Amino acid sequence: MSFPVLVWIVAIIVLAGGLTLIGLIRLLSAGDEIQNRLSNYAVAPDEPSQRDTGRRRARLFRLRARMNTTMSMFVSAKLGLQLLSANWPITETEFILIRLGATLVGFFIGWLLLGSLISGAGLALLAYIIPGVSLNRSIYQRQILFQKQLPDVLVLLSGALRSGYSLQQALELVTRETRPPASEEFIRVGREVSLGLPLNQALINLTDRMHNDDLYLVVTAININSKVGGNMVVMLEAVTKTIRERIRLFGELRALTSQQRFNSYILTLLPIGFGALMFVLNPKYISRLFEPGIWLCIPIGALVTTILGNIVIQKLVKIDV
């Protein structure tokens, strides 16, 4: 296939995608005229610039709501929980669209600039992976920071309960006196309780977002104490002492196994990164490994053994505390 034909194909695909996007926007924005006519009577007089800004924000909010409703069939509860854990201010639909758009842009950039479908596919795969990796990295960093804040949160809760506060009032105090992510998570707990969710269920949702064993221990103790009674201050102090000892021991183990974990990361990422670099620099040379025949066994065997080696090393250095 000649280069002019490829250019025409790309132009037709881009034009079709643009027309589809315009039609989707017009479909989602249907009905805004009635809302705008009603807003002339329902909205109090204000400065023209403020009214225009408010209308644009309302129109954008309605467009966003319609888009999320229309594409709700493509989302999952797991993705929604991940976005909540990372505290990203986007919906599941918007994350999927961002990922899809990045994949398409990466494919066309790799195809047009490097002149190879294989390079375009490799860049598209990289663009598809990056949002998911960024999301998981954000979740991990936030959970680690929350784990470091947890002992201070428990000390603050114990002091508030000893002063005569109720549990819900003590949680409100935590939202005012702590920094993110602890303050953000307990604000979400208070918001769920204000919307009618029981406190024990709101705390269970918190453990689902943070995936922290120490937090699960605290929430379980609080829920048991609320059912059978007892001195919650003494219970929280005992749990706080246990958590501090676990954190200290866990830090020592991570320091002892840091070299092995670093080696596993290097040995896993090195062949993948080198192969991706060769696809970009010289796709014809590296593509011979993926031709049908005995040469195809080399990348398949390398991928399988690399994954198995990483799993074995991670299992060896993983010690439950």
Image (tube, rainbow, N blue to C red):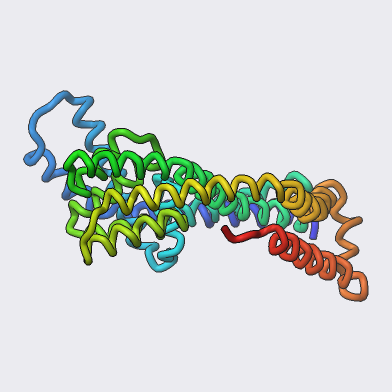
Q: Quadrant of residue 57?
A: top left
User: Is the residue 156 above or below the residue 303 in the image?
Assistant: above
Where is residue 259? Give x, y as percent. Answer: 76, 47
Q: Position of residue 60 (x, y in %)?
A: 31, 44
The residue drawn where x is 65% and y is 53% is 10
Q: Is residue 269 visible?
A: no
The number of discs equals: 0
Q: Quadrant of the C terminus?
A: bottom right
Residue 37: image quadrant is top left
Q: Which is more toward the observer, 255 or 189?
A: 255
* Front residue of 209 and 158: 158
Question: At 12% from the left edge and 27% from the top edge, which residue is drawn?
Answer: 46
Q: Residue at x 66, y 54 (%)?
A: 124
Asked whether, in this view, residue 126 is left or right of residue 248, the answer is right
The image shows residue 254 at horizontal and vertical percentages of 65, 48
Instruction: Residue 180: tell me if it is visible.
Output: yes
| Residue 174 spot, x, y in % from top left | 30, 40
**Quadrant of the image containing the N terminus:** bottom right
- Residue at 91% over, 56% down: 285
On screen, residue 15 versus residue 119, left or right, reads: left
109 with respect to 212 (left or right): right
Vertical placement of residue 219 versus 304, above or below: above
With respect to residue 293, does 109 lie above or below? Answer: above
